[in-house]
Amino acid sequence: MSNSIFKQNYFEIFSQPVSTELDIDLLKEKNRELQQQVHPDRFANSSDAEKRQAMQITSLVNEAFETLKNSLTRLQYMLTLKGVDMNGETDTAMDGVFLMEQMELREEIANVDSQKNSLDVLDEMALELKARSVNLVSDFESAFNDDALDKGRDIVRKLQFINKAQIEINDKIEQIEDEFI
Amino acid sequence: MALLQISEPGQSTKPHEHKFAIGIDLGTTNSLVASVRSGQPDTLPNSSGEHLLPSVVQYTPDAIVVGAVAKKNQIEDPHNTISSIKRLMGRGADDLISQFESLSEVLPFEFAVTDSAVAKIKTVAGDKAAVEVSADILKVLKLRGEQSLGDKLEGAVITVPAYFDDAQRQATKDAATLAGLNVLRLLNEPTAAAVAYGLDTGAEGIVAVYDLGGGTFDISIMQLKKGVFEVLSTGGDSALGGDDFDHAIAEWILKQANINSRNLTASLLRLVLSEACKAKEALSKLEQVEINIQFANDNSWTGLLSRDELSSLIDPLIKKSLMSCRRALRDAGVEKNQILDVVMVGGSTRALRVREQVGQFFETDPRVDIDPDRVVAIGAAIQANALVGNDSDGNLLLMDVLPLSLGIETMGGLAEKIISRNTPIPVSRAQEFTTYKDGQTAMAVHVVQGERELVDDCRSLAKFELRGFPSHVAGAARIRVTFQVDADGLLSVTAKEEVSGVVASVEVKPSYGLQDSEIEEMLKASMAFAGEDKDARSLREQQVEADRVLEAIDSAVADDGDEMLSQDERETIQAARSELMIARHNAVETQQLKEAMAKLEKASAEYVARRMNASVQKSMAGHQVEEFNK
């Protein structure tokens, strides 16, 4: 089974170069095109074996798409391509200054009052985090290209923290908005 | 074997041969059946020209009455006349006590105490599970389809609320099986509506489908592009709908009349609900309505319900729906101003207050020019037509998502998410577990669905026991559990111990579903297959399937067997083919035929995969990156 889709990496599935800078609109376009070929609905009149295979291939395409669409999972995936698996790692020593900052930020989010004008404060925090993550992603690109994998891993860990803070901000925003809907 | 019949996209392999398929909208209040005839999708009426079939079933000692007549008999015979059964689909007996407390107070049915996990309603014709009641509605729609189309049905697409969980979907599929329908797909209602709307208007862009039916609410944010309908996110409430408006009004009436609902007979409760519903509908046209109810000979009540009063009664319910809209937008990563159209679906969007509030929320006038009752069935018919191969363009593709996160119970009663909500389906995820005791050879896995952190707050789907893996020291076994969600949104689970490669047996105990044996019982009891020898029927079906498999393999080998198969492979396939050919003409048992087919499928699996890959490569090759940048 040469050239099997199951042996391709996620970037190859969508014919994209391995890079943090992925054109998301293009990825979506490629995904739609690929789904047209492999989606189980294309095999509604086929045998059970073929239906099953279509489901497995489409599941893989969906998994690849979701992984690449999100910048954090995309970076993690890039590391696994170089043999660095960050799942279940135990050695997670981190930059102390960064950790302190994050703890303060989380506390700040938790302490935001449930008032309508707090939304502006939260929006600003979200923007700031977004800017930081953009910088970190570009740092990652050069570290990755230089094979500085330890550095790459540190950056991904930082991004994980930022991601969690972003989720907390969103939850808080949602909570406040629901109250004032 | 479509994989073996791969042709250029957009070209069919065979001369056109029309097959009949239907789309069914199995609604809380009304159900519909639709079909595509001469390229035109439309809902099918009954002999007196009615398109809507009230989803009401009356059981009498010697007959099952479905539809308008049953609805009329509801007040006289409340215990044996069942409406809004959709709300009980996939629900367990204990759910009714916890989640539906206020509802069951006003539901006039009596529930039977049985050893089944599924709630059953007492009727004069015996205890009825929700699946059986739904099957009785489906049978009527199936018959209507067969009579209108004048031919055997290839299959049906049945719609479900996007926010239905696994148990509710499974229950719907079981009901269809019970009604003798071949389910081509379970399709999410807002997706079906978007298909009908999209093909009708030719709109391309991001749309929101706000679907408020009799008992369920869905919001889907979708991207429409070149015949591809891609769900970006979905949200909702599978227990929120027009019924709740009626209940709120009924409670208001009882409060105004100073009557405790517990002192009312089932007939009177039904009457109050029906008057509440009438008042609600009238208020879409009038500023206020007079309600008049005769509770007893000497006790009647008359009162006025104004639009403003109605708004204050239903606003909390509408607000709940808008909270789901906000979350769906966030999950989709879409801003309100990116929404091209808000499509209103479901009878309850006729309420003016709903339109007003939705318009205010999305900051745009919602589209109310499509028939909110029929659009879902029409979309389902279009999809059914495409699935059986009648769609000559072949471009229609629906990409849907998982509505609610799937997870497993971990230590301390916490739910750990394995697949998060709004992940595109089909999807497959594996999770590794290990043992915590020396010599442990079994473990229990509890699968749940929902967004909450505690298992108790999520819906319990199933409990699995993994057995028979070899004994290791604690922590050395590696049990890989794979969760597969198919395109219908239905979950299946497999497990394998990685160190030894032993496939552990998975014992499924659906928490709120019917056991297979229960479904079998119902099937036996049902009239669907009466007068027809089941074995003979299934043998015939397998013979048809065998013919299809044979034809597919022959045409594939003729097509590219020379390039893609080695001599050896070709011989193996030919041997399996001959065996199937013999079985096709001589086998008297279905099993023999099935085995021969499985053998051929196994022999050609590699070849099938190769062809599929070749096809994928071909479709992706020759495209330049720049083409997509336009």
Image: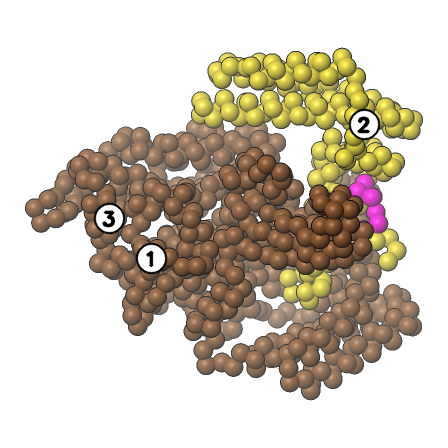
Chain colours: A yellow, B brown
Mark 1 vs mark 3, CA separation in Å: 14 Å
Amino acid carrying label 3: it is Leu
Mark 2 vs mark 1, CA separation in Å: 60 Å
Disc 2 target residue: A91
Quick one: B376 or B497, which is closer to the camera? B497
Image coords of residue B149 (percent x, y): 47, 70
Q: Is residue B95 magenta?
A: no
Disc 3 target residue: B269
* Magenta stretch prevailing secondary structure: helix
Quick check: B23 above or below B323? Answer: below
Secondary structure state at the residue bearing disc 1: strand
Residue B443 shown left or right of residue B568 in the figure:
left
Amino acid carrying label 2: it is Asp
Assess disc 1: are there few (<14), some (14-19) or many (≥20) residues with their C-alpha within 10 Å of its C-alpha.
many
Q: Is residue A8 magenta?
A: yes
Assess disc 3: are there few (<14), some (14-19) or many (≥20) residues with their C-alpha within 10 Å of its C-alpha.
many
Mark 3 vs mark 2, CA separation in Å: 65 Å
Query: What chain does mark 1 sit on?
Result: B
- Return the mark for residue B82: 1
Q: Residue at x 57, y 58 (%)?
A: B185
Asked whether residue B13 appears in the rendered view, the answer is no
Amino acid carrying label 1: it is Ile
Query: What chain does mark 3 sit on?
Result: B
Marks 3 and 1: in contact by CB < 8 Å? Answer: no
Secondary structure state at the residue bearing disc 2: loop
Assess disc 2: are there few (<14), some (14-19) or many (≥20) residues with their C-alpha within 10 Å of its C-alpha.
few
Tags 1 and 3 both on a single chain: yes
